[in-house]
Image (cartoon, grey):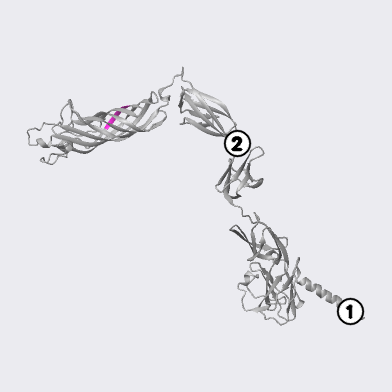
Amino acid sequence: MNRYLLIILLMIVVGNICYAQEQRQMEFDNDFRETKATLGNLTSIFADDSWKTDANGRAAAIIRIRVTHMSVAEMRKLSPKGSPQLAMGNRNFDEENHNWYIAVSTSKGNWLEMAHPAYGVSTRLYFSDELNPNSIYDVTLINNETTTISVRSIPQGATVFIDGDRKGVTPCEVPGQRFGKHSLKLLLDGASIIKDIEVEQGHATFDDFDFRKRAIVRLISDPSGAKIYMDDVEIGKAPINEYSVVLGAHTFKAVLNAEQIDEISLNVTENTTLIDLHPVKKGTVQISTRYSGRPVEADLYIDDNEHFSGQAVYNITKPYGEYNFRVSYGARVKEKRIKVNKPEINHIFKLSAKNDFVWPWQREHDRAVAGLSLGCVAKELVAVGESDKLSGEPAYWREGKWLKGFQAGFYFMPSLSWGGGLYFGLFYELYIAKSDIYAGTSIDSDFNHFTEHSLNIPFHLCYTLPFSRKFSISLHSGVGMDVGIHASYAGGALGIGNADDAEPITDYYGKSNSGPGRLNFTIDFGLQLNMGPVGLNVFYSKGIKNHGNIVGWEEDVKTKINKFGFSLSYVIQRSKL
């Protein structure tokens, strides 16, 4: 009998020893206490905001278990177990704060354990005294599980710190590291990398520490959408923006399909910002045309579906393949099928003018776009009655005379490739006349000189007929407007009287002053010879506005002003047609 009792006693002792060893992995700390703190919003922990009850429906005490040295994923696997009288009610895990909340009976003599599928069952937490209902009790559950973690870096030699304690130099093995969250810091050549790590079962190697310098690049392909590989690892589809690449030699590849692939080897530096891949091979074809041995601006057609014009040299980029190129200049056309099979191809189309009639408007020529003009101008006043016609000078009304002056200004002649265009500008005109018809009279000194300042604004249609590249004739016609600025009689030239004379007479314009109106409208006709940078312009303007009757003339007399003149101009802007 004693032998059986001894065996039973031995089994109990061994069981207690095994149980104690099993509990070493997870154990409750001796910090169990009632806290005066509140839980705050119960709804965030439990399903509702009311105080919890035990399994018997009585007001419960809440045990708040703080779990340490365990990953959040493993904390979720914990399950509470207790004595039958513990009558556990609601139980929930607060992931953010790593707390378990368990509603239990307030009776004394109960106990609580936490079980885990991998770590086993914790030590028991005994409640020797009764718990207060509607109260909170705090306790800490410590996981004693440790493991050896490995820390690697590129390059090696980085100093390793875990939770502020130095552990070694990479590659580094750190034994006895508790499970759960830790701060891992690596230092190398003044650079540091800090990361929060979580040690758990099956997660004990940390090698995501790369101290190599990198460039931020953009990867594109032509066309877009190709799969991009770096060092035979697919990294996405083009375009890829702000991609981090370790400095050094790499191979980049763009793949559209099995046949369309572009691969380049590149040494990426800190200045590398763009990687451009072309899975569809393309070449640039330079097309130029010569007519009678000189370059000309011919039209270019490609496969009858692309048309280009206005250039002497075309640089056309096309995918590898064969294309039909055709140039057209005037009445001459030439075409050739060109195979694009390398990055750069040059081809010159030669057009011969022999036995070929070319109209002047089909020839290449320079276009005078803008110019400065200086010349002479004259105008006459024409009065027409029922049977009489009088032509005279507008200043002193001397029959058969013209009022002469100078003209200066600028013009614009924008035109199209076929020669048609516009002619408009702004010209200043100065007219001067001298007369002694009042000699010996009381107003002799007041009327010796006549001066007029005016502006001329033409707006014409224009057509340019070229005869060579540097020589052409421009015909222009349209309406013009003269605006009188100031006109006066005085004893001195330019309307400035002598010191002893009276004030100049400036009321020249208008019927009441026996003068024409301030505004004059005309129909203009002009011819301009363009010789390189120089232009010679001859024009005639016929008045279309009636300026009323001059004092002393019959009432039915119509009075108009005609002009003619010539000028030289200098081209200040030029382009080719």
What is the magenta segment's predominant secondary structure?
A: strand
257 up-or-down from 400: above or below: below
Q: What is the distance, in whole Å, between disc 1 and disc 2 at their CAs?
A: 92 Å
Residue type for callout 1: Leu
Return the x and y of residue 530 as percentages of the image width and height.
34, 27
On the picture, is 128 further left or further right than 438? Answer: right
Residue 523 colored in magenta in the image: yes
Q: Quadrant of residue 181?
A: bottom right
Return the x and y of residue 238 as percentages of the image width and height.
60, 45
Residue type for callout 2: Lys
37 up-or-down from 94: above or below: below
Residue 77 visible at all = yes
Residue depicted at x 40% and y 25%: 469
Q: Nearer the viewer, residue 55 or 574?
A: 574
- Front tag of 1 and 2: 1
Residue depicted at x 21% and y 33%: 431
Q: What is the number of the mark on residue 6? A: 1
Identify the residue at the far right of this view.
1
Identify the residue at the far top of this view.
355
The region drawn magenta spans 522-528
